[in-house]
Amino acid sequence: MTNRTVQELAEQSYKYGWTTEVEEESAPPGLSEEIVRWISERKGEPEWLLEWRLKAYHHFMRLLGDAQLPAWANVTHPPIDFQAIRYYAAPKPKLELESLDQVDAEILKTYERLGIPLEEQKRLAGVAVDAIFDSVSVMTTAKETLAKYGVIFSSVSEAVKEHPELVRKYLGSVVPHSDNFYAALNSAVFSDGSFVYIPPGVRCPLELSTYFRINAEGSGQFERTLIIADKGSYVSYLEGCSAPMRDENQLHAAVVELVALDDAEIKYSTIQNWYPGDDNGKGGIYNFVTKRGKCAGDRSRISWTQVETGSAITWKYPSVLLQGDHSTGEFYSVALAKGRQQADTGTKMTHIGKNTSSRIISKGISAGHGNNTYRGLVKVLPKAEGAVNFTQCDSLLIGDQCGAHTVPYIEVQNRSASVEHEASTTKVSEEQLFYCQQRGLAREDAQSVIVNGFVRDVVKRLPLEFAVEADRLLEVNLEGTVG
Amino acid sequence: MLEVRDLHAEVNGVEILKGVDLSVGVDETHAIMGPNGSGKSTLAYVLAGRPGYEVTAGSVTFDGDDLLALPAEERARRGLFLSFQHPVEIPGVRMDHFLRAGYNELRKNAGEEQLDPLKFDRLIRSKAKAVEMEPAMTKRAVNEGFSGGEKKRNEVLQMAVLEPRLRILDEIDSGLDVDALREVARGITDLSVPGTSTILVTHYDRVLSYLEPDHVHVLIDGRIARSGGRALAKEIEERGYDWLEAGAGV
């Protein structure tokens, strides 16, 4: 957390490179062809990208007209009025408070429990901060290091200008605009996001994180991320933050695309803690994300690790297309649903090449009135000789008002495949809590210990700094749920 | 050290303890014997503060303080240790991490400095050796996949690390063969530093030949039906509990 904080503070005053132009106008609410053209023009995009957006827009409007909204997820919410959303807004200066005394006491308590340093608390809460660190040098060092290795790490907008050939080749190559309802919407109106390219044979020397980016905030609603690992390269990418993030935009429809060429490896880690709404289910983010990786090359590997504790509704299935021979896809997930939260999350592993393997470890925690669903598809296509999959779905229940559901789909079209599925549902038992108490742990700490043990297999896959945050995050989120 | 007066307790609305009196002094070892369902384990749980075990009347003091007013963890921090008849599994939580958390809570309570992982590792290694347990076992998840004997030995290890002043051993001999029992009993004896008191809860006399009690109490239907010395336990071994149950009007 401390390192991260330095970086974040650093960003406050970093004024060089990577910033998108400061927009001066906002679009009126509503979605139309004109709005899409307007967005593209404001961003100074080339013709091909405008065409791409428009195609997506027309597809989306057809789906919307036919009322083809995704209906299969185990979640409920009032209908979304897509014409009431403002699809393009100039970055607003944040409301600046004068001191932390003006910040909601509950929020401050949470920050404190997460161990967020004071200066950082101020920044998150929107209090004016004096940047006291030598910010420029931190950023410059990172940029210089990446440049030395030829790694491209920029906003998508910048990449469209600087590396159009790469963006054009790969944008939509994994998640086409026609993939699903929200992917179509994102393709039409996406604001910005991260672009990463790792050249052949390069092992990216830094963990790449959205924190490096000055304009990470405010582009959250329709974010678009594209990561390409060229032959024999490696990159670890971190997304998110454990601090509770509020956003006035209720609907988030991001798209993330990963491409791994021959012998390349991409590790993508997420911590998601968007505002979940109040205890009665009022407010909160709808997090409808499409994340997919393509193991395009032989012996390539893509690994998704996620800790999802926030949002009112999470609808998310980080997937891998195992196209290259001997390629590997992995999905490690912790999803927490408490209060009135609903999580419908899982993965799709599509085995296409020969001797491909996939591994799925999903840990769902339900507390309060939370509802947690694992939904996963393992698909072995006819030519995928020798495919191997292992799936393990564990659910942990805290209290007796919550729900856990497991919906595995398995479609095997090649007889040589080996597909294994294990599932379990357990409750935090009175006996376990008492055992911990008898050894000196307070009841709440006892529950944290049990929960942290439950998620261990997943959390240990996270980069160390993230893992510590994940543990603390679960602890804080589960406060007050112990019986 | 421990004074139990007219203790009544119920579980799920059913009265199990119906007026237990017990006085345990410093350095004493007491055996609580009794047939199945007489309330032995309930007594152990009530003393340790298990939620759901409701005291309806009576009092318990520990070093003069009202024990019943304290939550379970507070009792543990003050030096009360319960060795479970069926130690609980906590998947994914490493034994040494778990025990260090508890250990440091006890130290915090005593106003002592907390041990960092490195120092604690040295401590747990030496204790594991003392109770004849493989140190590698302490890197495994708490009791997960342990055999019955390993679980009991693990209880003794925790006791060795936490160094309680009042030890309540609930059926410490169950699931142990003769050799294992001898080793576990030796561990318990070796850990009996001056100032330690012990309550042995047991169905059989067997364990008492290793851990010589000063006092033997027989619990019948939620009351102490008879108290005596070592000879009482031997008599029970020969005659069973029937004659005592008849006397208690059961």
Image (spheres, coloured by chain):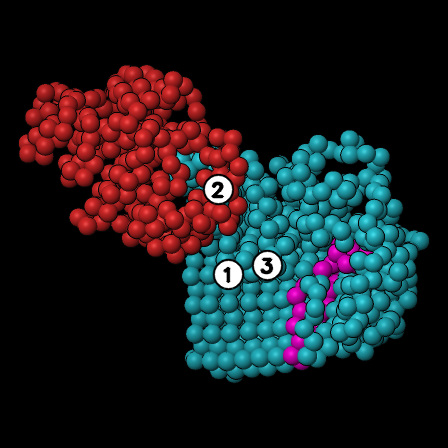
Chain colours: A cyan, B red
In the rendered image, which residue does mark 3 sit on?
A462
Residue B212 appears in view: yes
| Crowdedness near tag 1: few (<14), some (14–19) or many (≥20) residues, C-alpha within 10 Å | many
Question: In the rendered structure, the residue with mark 1 lies on which chain?
Answer: A
Task: Say whether mark 2 and mark 3 are on the same chain.
Answer: no
Horizontal side of A379 relative to A289 (left or right) equals left
Q: Amino acid at mark 1?
A: Ile
* Residue at 23% across, 28% down: B30
What number is the disc on residue B101?
2
Does dot 1 land on a helix, a strand or a loop? strand
The answer to which of A175 and B112 lies nearer the viewer is: B112
Q: Is residue B153 above or below residue A183?
A: above
Does dot 3 land on a helix, a strand or a loop? loop
Question: In the rendered structure, the residue with mark 3 lies on which chain?
Answer: A
* Residue at 65% across, 79% down: A232
In the rendered image, which residue does mark 1 sit on?
A361
- Image location of residue A93, percent across then percent down: 87, 46
Q: Nearer the viewer, mark 1 or mark 3?
A: 3
The answer to which of A397 and A112 lies nearer the viewer is: A112
Does dot 2 land on a helix, a strand or a loop? helix
Which segment is the magenta one? A209-237
